[in-house]
Image: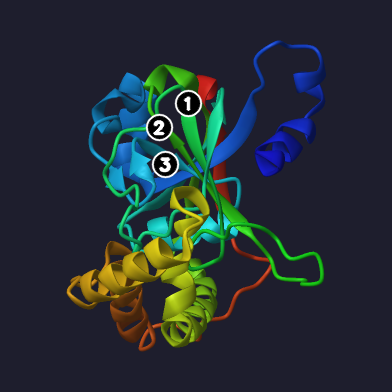
Amino acid sequence: MTNILKKVAQFNWNETIEVPIIPALHGTDESVAYSIITTSFVALAKGDAGYFGKGLYFTTSAEYALPYFATKPSPTVLICFLITGNAYPVIEHPRAKDNLMGSALKPNFHSHYVLCRIDGNPIPHIMENKEDTYYDEIVIEQESCVVPYYLLKIKKDKLIALAMDIQKRQEKLRQEENINEDDINNINVLRTSNNPDTRLNSQKERNIKNSEKPKSPRKKLTDSILNILDTEEKKSDYSSSSDDKVEFQRLNDI
């Protein structure tokens, strides 16, 4: 819970209000973005049965959000204000037996908060002696807790170089994770049991289940990025310069 509180403390306005509010990003296509600012997130509220629970997904990192909108026909980002309420700190790995994929939010919690790596996998804690960069995902159940405030339209061809870099970092982490599969299977033991025999049996069951799982949604997203990169390679030198233009609009001006 410490990490979400640190995020809340970054914004001075939370010192004078009872219910904390934080800004976050939602990447999508332009047509969907305009639909959202017209009818709010109502249409999407029941549509995303994601890795960390069913709801609306946001992040506070533009870099982390990039793969989710870079492949869209007209890449667009909504900057929103969120009320996260009592946030559940997610450490359950998507490939663990008791994962949260597609499940309702935890009882007595208003949102799920996930501290994660660039590949989207959660981490149970930050090691103080490491200088790794961490990201987050925020899952909101009620669309009434979200207010879209800014809309950014971004040129698609300027995203290619960034998408390539992120994809390489994600793939490197996945390769390391395949070597350390036992560590993944043991994460949920933090919540379920301290009994060594139970821990061992759970690990064996998870290894069997994981070997039967199809390609994950995140892997499909990576493949989609690679397909676009192969196509765009013939058109672009992948340069990213200060001339990149982003159309930035405040929603009450639209």
Residue positioned 54% across, 66% down in the render: 118
Secondary element type, mark 2: loop
Q: Which mark is residue 57?
A: 3
Q: Report, in whole angstroms, how far the alpha carbon at label 1 lies from the one at label 3.
A: 16 Å
Location of mark 2 (residue): 106
Secondary element type, mark 1: loop
Q: Report, in whole angstroms, how far the alpha carbon at label 2 lies from the one at label 3.
A: 15 Å
Q: Amino acid at mark 1?
A: Phe
Label 3 crowd bin: few (<14), some (14–19), many (20+), radius 10 Å: many
- Does any portion of residue 198 appear in the rendered image? yes
User: Sequence-wise, which precedes: disc 1 or disc 3?
Assistant: 3
Residue positioned 29% across, 29% down in the render: 45
Q: Vertical placement of 90 versus 215: above or below?
A: above
Question: Mark 1–mark 3 contact, CB under 8 Å?
Answer: no
* Nearer to the camera, 176 or 14: 176
Q: Position of residue 66 (x, y in %)?
A: 48, 60
* Nearer to the camera, 147 or 14: 14
Q: Report, in whole angstroms, how far the alpha carbon at label 1 lies from the one at label 2.
A: 6 Å
Q: Amino acid at mark 2?
A: Lys
Label 1 crowd bin: few (<14), some (14–19), many (20+), radius 10 Å: some
Q: Position of residue 161 (x, y in %)?
A: 52, 77
**151 to the left or right of 222:** right
Residue positioned 40% across, 56% down in the render: 69
Q: Vertical placement of 47 versus 21: above or below?
A: below
Q: Position of residue 217 (x, y in %)?
A: 27, 63
**201 to the left or right of 23:** left
* Nearer to the camera, 175 or 142: 175
Question: Mark 1–mark 2 contact, CB under 8 Å?
Answer: yes
Q: Amino acid at mark 3?
A: Tyr
Location of mark 1 (residue): 109
Residue positioned 57% across, 38% down in the render: 24
